[in-house]
């Protein structure tokens, strides 16, 4: 991003992301709505042991863990809109790690040992997600095992990923063989992709995320009917700490339907975190992405059962319209229809750094159409050859140190004196290989149990992170690259 465009970046980063919008763009994944999409109690509970705010993949994981590990805990889950209507119900359906292209940066930031632990945690999280999906139904969740072909448009990006693979394998021999490096000829001849400097192949998967999460909540409501309340269309407007009124349930959650008192509060609101936790505005910030479903016609080969894709390139600012292309496009092909689900972003800074999923970036939609055509050797200027089935937006959450934030919130972040508020957020665009086990770990910690043994310590809230890594200034440095 150019400095001129980023002159007001601090103002953008520290603005209130607001509550989830009432009129979001329509996500293909959320059709048809699950029968519990608008479930709520006839009357709000007066109090609850644990209040979970958010019904995405994190909220589902935290809730499931608490209910299964404690035999009497009462849990109330709040959702501003319909069930799983946020980022999880809007993402790219990718089950993939980003170790090769991020390893060198991770190693420099947190050491080789911790970088290896993060990679293993990502792999284990995706394994756990597959287990959950199979427990529901592999067919219903459309869980598919594929090889992901990461394509690199320019030589510097390709050389960097090759260095990343070499460093990963040298530092962690047990991970050797995870990636296969392909030259441009093999990418073209074996995989039918064009115009790239090279690629890497690695095991991955695809899934229908909305179906996974809504089925998890459906199962929990059936199994723990007496201990679980799901309150959709019930945004939490404010959280306050008031132990003098009720010491057992010292937190009050204010909603348009009334007030609920809670012993502990869990923030699983990701891109909207800064609304209830203003002290995290800037260190955490939203980033809006665009998703498309495109149809290239009947003559295109169906590879959804074997392959998913990513296109990596050096981020750049377009001098013609001032939009910024962020360096990554990700895609999959539906195994039944053959339609392509491709996502990415090319927009202005103000459009991108936003939690507003009620509008679309036209420049991003065109960019994704052109990119898909180019990848498969079609004329990128002939958009008519890529029928746009639908498009929508979704808001992710990033942190200034590129690490998730997991753990108990200190009063400096919560703004409240109590110590019963928790958070799990900021996956920096890669929620699927982090959120489920991070959520399980947080659920265990809330109950006084240890987190998953592979949970990276660098994900936890610490004094060191608060003093040195989590700041608006660091977020600006990150975005300016």
Image (cartoon, grey):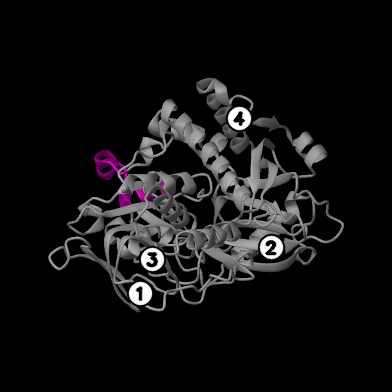
Of residue 318 and residue 39, the one placed in the foreground of this image is 39
- Mark 4–mark 1 Cα distance, whole angstroms, equals 55 Å
* Foreground disc of the pair 3, 4: 3
Mark 3: secondary structure: loop
The residue tagged 3 is 17
Look at the magenta stretch and give its main secondary structure. helix
Q: Secondary structure at mark 4?
A: helix
Mark 2, residue position: 293
- Which residue occupies the foreground of this view, 354 or 382? 354
Q: Is residue 348 left or right of residue 146?
A: left
Are dots 2 and 1 in contact, CB under 8 Å?
A: no
Distance, label 4 to label 2, CA atoms, is 31 Å
List the residue tagged with mark 4: 162
Q: Which residue is mark 1?
A: 44
Which tag, 2 or 3, sits closer to the chain's start? 3
- Circle 2 Cα neighbour tier, 10 Å, few/some/many (<14 / 14–19 / ≥20): many
Q: Where in the figure is residue 365, as x and y percent of width and height?
A: 63, 64
Q: Nearer the viewer, residue 32 or 260?
A: 260
For the magenta stretch, what is the residue range? 461-481
């Amino acid at each position: 991003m150019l400095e001129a465009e980023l002159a007001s970046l601090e103002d953008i980063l520290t603005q209130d992301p607001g509550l989830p919008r009432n009129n979001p763009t329509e996500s293909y994944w959320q059709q048809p709505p699950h029968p519990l999409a608008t479930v709520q109690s006839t009357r709000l509970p007066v109090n609850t042991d644990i209040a979970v705010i958010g019904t995405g993949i994190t909220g589902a994981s935290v809730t499931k863990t608490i209910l299964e590990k404690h035999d009497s805990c009462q849990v109330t889950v709040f959702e501003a809109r319909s069930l799983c209507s946020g980022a999880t119900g809007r993402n790219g359906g990718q089950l993939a790690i980003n170790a090769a292209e991020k390893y060198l940066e991770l190693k420099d930031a947190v050491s080789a040992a911790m970088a290896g632990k993060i990679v293993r945690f990502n792999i284990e999280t995706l394994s756990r997600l597959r287990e959950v999906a199979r427990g529901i139904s592999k067919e219903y969740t459309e869980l598919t095992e594929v090889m992901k072909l990461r394509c690199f448009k320019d030589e510097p990006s390709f050389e960097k990923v090759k260095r990343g693979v070499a460093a990963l394998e040298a530092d962690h021999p047990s991970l050797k063989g995870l990636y296969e490096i392909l030259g441009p000829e093999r990418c073209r001849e074996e995989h039918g992709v064009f115009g790239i400097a090279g690629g890497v192949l690695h095991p991955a998967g695809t899934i229908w995320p909305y179906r996974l999460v809504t089925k998890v909540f459906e199962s929990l409501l059936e199994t723990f009917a007496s201990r679980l309340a799901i309150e959709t269309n019930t945004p939490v407007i404010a959280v306050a700490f008031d132990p003098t009124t009720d010491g057992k349930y010292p937190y009050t959650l204010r909603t348009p339907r009334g007030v609920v008192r809670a012993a502990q509060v869990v923030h699983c609101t990701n891109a909207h975190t800064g609304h209830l936790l203003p002290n995290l505005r800037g260190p955490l910030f939203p980033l809006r992405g665009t998703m498309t479903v495109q149809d290239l016609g009947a003559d295109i080969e169906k590879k959804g059962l074997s392959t998913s894709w990513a296109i990596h390139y050096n981020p750049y600012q377009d001098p013609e319209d001032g939009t910024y292309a962020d360096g990554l496009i990700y895609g999959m092909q539906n195994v039944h229809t053959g339609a392509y689900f491709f996502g990415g972003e090319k927009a202005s800074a103000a459009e991108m750094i936003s939690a507003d999923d009620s509008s679309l970036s036209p420049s991003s939609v065109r960019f994704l159409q052109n990119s898909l055509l180019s990848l498969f050797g079609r004329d990128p200027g002939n958009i008519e050859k890529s029928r746009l089935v639908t498009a929508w937006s979704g808001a992710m959450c990033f942190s200034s140190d590129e690490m998730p934030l997991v753990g108990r919130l200190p009063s400096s972040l919560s703004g409240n004196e109590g110590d019963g508020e928790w958070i799990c957020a900021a996956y920096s665009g890669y929620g699927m290989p982090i959120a489920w086990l991070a959520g399980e770990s947080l659920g265990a910690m809330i109950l006084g149990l240890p987190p998953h043994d592979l949970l990276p310590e660098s994900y936890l809230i610490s004094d060191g992170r608060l003093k040195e890594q989590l700041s608006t200034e660091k977020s600006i440095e990150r975005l300016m690259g």
